[in-house]
């Protein structure tokens, strides 16, 4: 159960992180240069904008919050090497079938419409010049609830998205939260 909570929380944080990661502009260096050469302008046109990357994150976040497994899986590559990682070594899901099974378990740990994340404390991201890959990372504060019992937690999230068939999809997603030992009592 704790493992599923960690994964869910991390996934939600990733969504918020990525959407907040680049508030505007583009991920690629030189994408807004007005004096660039024709070659630089072509690279800039191919470089993904933050809005393009946020769209895949928004779709993932909405599907997660709505507990819509098919919509959520549509945000991932169907490539068998696509991976979702959690905190521990046992938290590794590779390929669509394992990722689907992991999210099926995660959906049991919260009520729909209760996921809230804030990834503004630290975030970063970037993209390749060809405009086919982008990466994001953040530290997030998260909240959700199950049957009226609310949870607050922090996590680190990172992910890689790739443009496949003219659509951005996750090829990797990593979510982790540090173990916090119980308070010492005397």
Image (tube, helix red, strand yellow):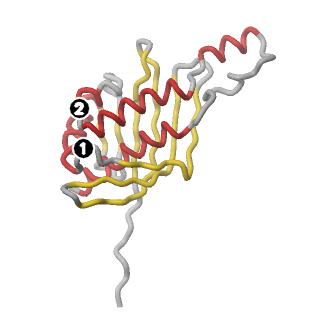
- Image position, residue 182 (x, y; %): 34, 74
Q: Is residue 111 left or right of residue 88?
A: left
Give coordinates of residue 90: x percent, y percent: 28, 49
Q: Residue at x 59, y 15 (%)?
A: 46
Residue at (34% x, 50% y) in the render: 9
Q: For this rendering, which residue is in front, 139 or 83?
A: 139
Mark 2 touching mark 1, by CB under 8 A?
no
Q: Quadrant of residue 97?
A: top left
- Location of mark 2 (residue): 69
- The residue carrying mark 1 is 112
Residue that protrudes farthest toward the top in the picture: 38
Q: Residue at x 54, y 48 (%)?
A: 120
Kind of element beneath mark 2: helix
> x, y percentage for residue 156?
46, 50
Few, some or many residues within 10 Å of mark 1 (<14, 14–19, 20+): some
- Left or right of 4, for residue 60: right
Above or below residue 131? Residue 150 is below
């Amino acid at each position: 159960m704790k493992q599923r909570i960690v994964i869910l929380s991390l996934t939600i944080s990733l969504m918020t992180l990525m959407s907040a990661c680049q508030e505007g502009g583009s991920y690629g260096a030189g994408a807004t240069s007005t004096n660039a050469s024709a070659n630089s302008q072509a690279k800039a046109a191919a470089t993904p904008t933050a809005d393009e990357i946020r769209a895949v994150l928004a779709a993932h976040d909405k599907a997660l919050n709505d507990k819509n497994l098919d919509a959520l899986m549509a945000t991932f590559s169907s490539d068998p090497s696509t991976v979702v990682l959690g905190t521990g070594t046992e938290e590794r899901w590779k390929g669509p079938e394992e990722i689907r099974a992991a999210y099926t378990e995660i959906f049991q740990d919260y009520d729909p419409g209760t996921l809230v994340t804030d990834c503004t404390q630290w975030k970063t991201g970037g993209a390749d010049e060809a405009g086919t890959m982008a990466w994001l990372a953040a530290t997030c504060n998260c909240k959700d609830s199950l049957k009226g019992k609310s949870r607050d937690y922090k996590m680190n999230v990172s992910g890689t998205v790739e443009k496949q068939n003219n659509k951005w999809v996750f090829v990797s997603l990593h979510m982790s939260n540090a173990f916090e030992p119980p308070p010492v009592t005397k």
